[in-house]
Image (spheres, helix red, strand yellow):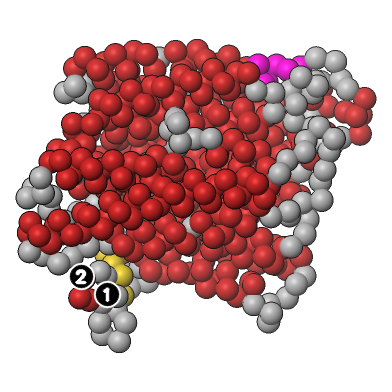
């Protein structure tokens, strides 16, 4: 069974499918391409669930690939090694699920360039899984850079024929902005990785880039802090936290609905995972020194973007800014530097992914019917689309942290973790200051719900239909996850705490 349940299969299978779809030998028929991509994602999700079912925290999945019997760059100790521990396993399963519902939602949102679109989706899936499962620093960076290619085309590509007078975006400009921010951050991150590799060799005499073999005890603290600062820039862009966040609202606004689901649901989590894997895990002493400063940045991100979010009128920009605010909670959980905070951080990643996928799906459905996403001009949706309204109410309630939904557990654990931190004054103050997030989040999400779904029916509402079966499946799947992990959070918490 261990041979079949292999990290390289998990990572590279989507890449193989991507190459197959884009090849001239594969059919260009829209229906065939879409069904093939959907069928593969369903298979991949089942494969991931099987790996999760057989996962043993005391015996994580580890695989190493060799090239003609040699390591990747043997003279530098750089290897193609994959390792899936508890957090990697959870995020890999989440990745597979989000891509599955993203592909399902593509039926009505993607109208042209189907082969290229589904190929880029599969390539992005492979790159993100590679980030979550890499056991080598340079292999991590390889997948980190690879992810930029499909993300650029998916953000900047024009895959929909749907247009409207209320929305005139510039996808190419947003894609370029995403690349510039990400590439700049990557250069800082590469510098940090190179310095970490070099000083590890100098201090320990062990030529390696394997995460489990890096020892920083012999590296001077000033060097560690400089390395950590370089890494923080790279991961901070993806997380993102203020002031490295400005690419995100534009990318979400101009990308198609399925792409926005992937960006918010998974891509942002790579920044949080990188902070955990490098800064939190490899350099704990240095991270402990800067954690109070990072906690302040986290609170600024939470509160500042929440206020900005309240002023937005475009539904997708509201969701985008709310994502930045919620990812501040993920950063705050890591800054607590204890088991509760780490557990809360990972749990909130999952909860936030489910919420944002549901919210972006709702925004996409509204735009497909009304050709409009401005909450000041939308009204009366509830009377014409009662099923969509029902899902919207429940998912919005989940997003504002109502008990019995998963985000409530993540938010409460984050605050408890911060209050129990060793940094008594600063983290406790940050935890207390982050509490207004619950109120601010309620304000802008309820404003979106009230303005869009209540009120007098607009004339165009007479011609729209309620959600289709595909849209129902996506929204029901998201809502089921929010309820299940809200009622039974131990399903995730036990896995996280079993290894870390």
In the rendered structure, the answer to whether residue 135 lies left or right of residue 23 reads left
Label 2: how many Cα within 10 Å (few below 14, some 14–19, many 20+) = some
* Residue identified by numbered label 2: 77
Q: Residue at x 39, y 17 (%)?
A: 434
Residue 34, horizontal then vertical, whole percent:
70, 62
Mark pair 1, 2: CA separation: 6 Å
Residue 118, horizontal then vertical, whole percent:
64, 62
Judged from this view, the residue extending furthest toward the bottom is: 68
Q: Which residues are magenta?
A: 447-454
Circle 2: element type: loop
Q: Main secondary structure of the magenta part?
A: helix
In the rendered structure, the answer to whether residue 39 lies left or right of residue 279 reads right
Residue 2, horizontal then vertical, whole percent:
30, 69
Circle 1: element type: loop
Q: Are marks 1 and 2 in contact (CB under 8 Å)?
A: yes
Q: Residue at x 21, y 54 (%)?
A: 196
**Vertical order, 479 against 375 (above or below):** below
**Vertical order, 462 against 500 (above or below):** above
Label 1: how many Cα within 10 Å (few below 14, some 14–19, many 20+) = few
**Vertical order, 413 against 357 (above or below):** above
């Amino acid at each position: 069974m261990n041979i079949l349940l292999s990290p390289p299969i998990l990572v590279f299978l989507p890449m193989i499918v991507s190459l197959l779809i884009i090849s001239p030998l594969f059919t260009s028929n829209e229906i065939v391409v879409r069904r093939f991509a959907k069928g593969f994602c369903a298979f991949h999700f089942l494969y991931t669930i099987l790996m999760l079912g057989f996962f043993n925290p005391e015996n994580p999945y580890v695989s190493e690939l060799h090239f003609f019997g040699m390591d990747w760059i043997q003279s530098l100790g750089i290897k193609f090694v994959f390792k899936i521990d508890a957090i990697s396993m959870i995020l890999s399963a989440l990745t597979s699920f989000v891509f599955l519902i993203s592909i399902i939602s593509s039926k009505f949102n993607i109208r042209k360039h189907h082969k290229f679109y589904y190929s880029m989706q599969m390539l992005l899936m492979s790159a993100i899984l590679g980030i979550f499962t890499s056991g080598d620093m340079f292999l991590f960076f390889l997948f980190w850079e690879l992810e930029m290619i499909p993300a650029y085309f998916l953000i900047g590509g024009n895959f929909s024929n749907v247009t409207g007078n209320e929305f005139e975006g510039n996808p190419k400009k947003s894609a370029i902005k995403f690349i510039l921010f990400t590439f700049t951050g990557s250069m800082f991150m590469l510098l940090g990785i190179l310095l970490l590799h070099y000083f590890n060799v100098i201090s320990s005499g062990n030529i390696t880039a394997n995460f489990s073999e890096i020892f920083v005890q012999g590296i001077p603290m000033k060097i560690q802090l400089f390395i950590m600062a370089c890494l923080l820039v790279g991961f901070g862009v993806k997380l993102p936290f203020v002031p490295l966040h400005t690419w995100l609202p534009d990318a979400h606004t101009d990308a198609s609905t399925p792409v926005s689901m992937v960006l918010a649901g998974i891509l942002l989590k790579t920044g949080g995972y990188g902070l955990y894997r490098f800064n939190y895990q490899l350099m704990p002493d240095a991270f402990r020194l800067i954690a109070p400063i990072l906690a302040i940045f986290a609170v600024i991100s939470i509160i500042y973007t929440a206020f900005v979010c309240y002023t937005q009128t475009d539904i997708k920009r509201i969701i985008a800014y709310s994502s930045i605010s919620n990812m501040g909670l993920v950063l705050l959980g890591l800054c607590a530097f204890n088991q509760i905070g780490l557990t809360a951080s990972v749990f909130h990643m999952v909860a936030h992914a489910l919420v944002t996928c549901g919210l972006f799906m709702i925004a996409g459905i509204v735009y497909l019917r009304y050709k409009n996403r401005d909450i000041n001009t939308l009204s009366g949706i509830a009377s014409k689309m009662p099923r969509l309204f029902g899902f919207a109410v429940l998912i919005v309630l989940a997003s504002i942290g109502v008990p019995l939904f998963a985000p409530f557990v993540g938010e409460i654990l984050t605050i408890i973790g911060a209050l129990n931190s060793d940094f008594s004054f600063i983290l406790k103050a940050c935890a207390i200051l982050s509490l207004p997030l619950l109120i601010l989040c309620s304000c802008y999400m309820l404003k979106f719900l009230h303005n869009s779904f209540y009120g007098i029916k607009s004339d165009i509402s007479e011609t729209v239909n309620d959600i289709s079966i595909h849209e129902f499946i996506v929204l029901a799947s998201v809502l089921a996850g929010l309820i299940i992990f809200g009622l039974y959070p131990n399903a995730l918490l036990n896995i996280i705490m079993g290894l870390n």
